[in-house]
Each structure stands twice: as C-alpha cells, then as structure tokens.
C-alpha cells in the first residue's frame, strides 16, 4: 500500500466568502508522486503536469488535483463528502500503484472541450433563461460538465444536436 495516511484540512474560500461550499486539502503522509501517471491513466485526468507533478480530473462532480504530497478538492457540501472522496481517492491511488505493471502510464492530459467552440453554437443573446448571466458563462458551465444542450431554452434544435455531438467526444465525469 503506497498511501496509508493523510491529514484533512477543510476551509472556505477567502476570495468568495459568501459561497457556502467547502474546500479540502488532504495532506499526504506518503509521497504518491510516482503513482500519478498510473492514476492519470486509470482516471483519465484532463490535466497532467510533469514539473511539478500533478494530475487534475473531475470525479464525483468535483474538481480534484493530486500532487505528490497533497490532494485538493473543490466545492464540497460538507466534511462528510470530503471524507468519502478522500477515502475513495486513497483506494484509487493504491489500486493504480498495485496494478502499475499492467497499466500503461499516461503523461498527457486528455483532450478538453473548448469554450469558444461551445459558444459558437449558442444564440449569444445573454437572455439568462439558462440561469447563467451570459452565454459565455453558460459555455464555460457546459465545458465543465455542469450544463448541457437541453439547458439553453432558445438553442435551435440543430445546434442542440451539434452541441451534444461535440460534447460526446469528451469524458467529463
């Protein structure tokens, strides 16, 4: 077992003090840096950096970044959700490490959808019917996997289909 223990730190954003969600750092007692390319291969991280090493991916509806000695998780409902995700990730790290002889390590991030490509398909009326302030914000939310083609009421049916097809080429879970 590579990762055995960690210390959890829960905090609220200092920049957005009105936001209710919590954030979490898992301070790792063991260095998991060598496991990152295997974890990236297994979980399909959309961003991988070699120096300093880290992998970022979306899981459980959260943006998660794993560094050799730290895990960062954003937008948590509560501390119990942080515990659940940290334990799940501990298991994923250890399983990827144990299975490394059969996993091809991945040192690249997977392709990501581009905001501008989504925006090209939108009506660009900034009507707010989707619940977002602008079409640009809506496009960003689509790329994040939070919104979809059906969430834009004035979107023409042919562009709904184009948006679905475009986003189908990317794994956003």
Image (tube, rainbow, N blue to C red):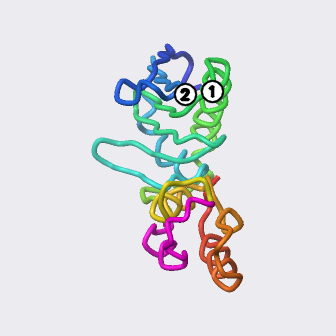
Residue 150 shown left or right of residue 15 in the figure: right
Q: Residue at x 49, y 55 (%)?
A: 133
Q: Which residue is drawn at 68% across and 68% down?
A: 153
Image quarter of residue 145: bottom right
Q: Is residue 158 above or below residue 46?
A: below
Image quarter of residue 76: top right
Residue 114 sits inside the magenta stretch: yes
Q: Residue at x 66, y 40 (%)?
A: 60
Secondary element type, mark 2: loop
Q: Which of 48 and 22 is in front in this view?
A: 22
Neighbour tally class for label 1: few under 14, some 14-19, many 20 plus, Cα within 10 Å: few
Q: Residue at x 46, y 39 (%)?
A: 65
Residue 23 sits inside the magenta stretch: no
* Residue with the mark numbered 2: 21
Quadrant, the N terminus: top right
Neighbour tally class for label 2: few under 14, some 14-19, many 20 plus, Cα within 10 Å: some
Residue situated furthest front in the rendering? 127
Disc on res. 77: 1
């Amino acid at each position: 077992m590579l990762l055995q223990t960690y210390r959890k730190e829960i905090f609220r954003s200092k920049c957005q003090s009105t936001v209710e969600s919590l954030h979490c750092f898992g301070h790792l007692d063991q260095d998991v840096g060598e496991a990152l390319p295997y974890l990236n291969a297994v979980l399909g991280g959309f961003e991988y950096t070699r120096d300093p090493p880290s992998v970022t991916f979306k899981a459980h509806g959260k943006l998660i970044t794993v560094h050799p000695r730290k895990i960062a998780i954003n937008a948590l409902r509560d501390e119990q959700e942080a515990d659940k995700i940290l334990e799940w990730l501990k298991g994923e790290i250890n399983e990827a490490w144990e299975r490394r002889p059969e996993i091809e390590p991945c040192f690249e991030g997977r392709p990501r959808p581009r905001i501008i490509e989504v925006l090209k398909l939108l009506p660009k009326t900034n009507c707010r019917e989707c619940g977002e302030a602008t079409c640009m914000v809506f496009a960003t939310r689509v790329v994040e996997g939070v919104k979809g083609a059906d969430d834009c009421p004035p979107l023409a049916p042919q562009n709904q289909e184009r948006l679905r097809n475009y986003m189908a080429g990317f794994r956003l879970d």
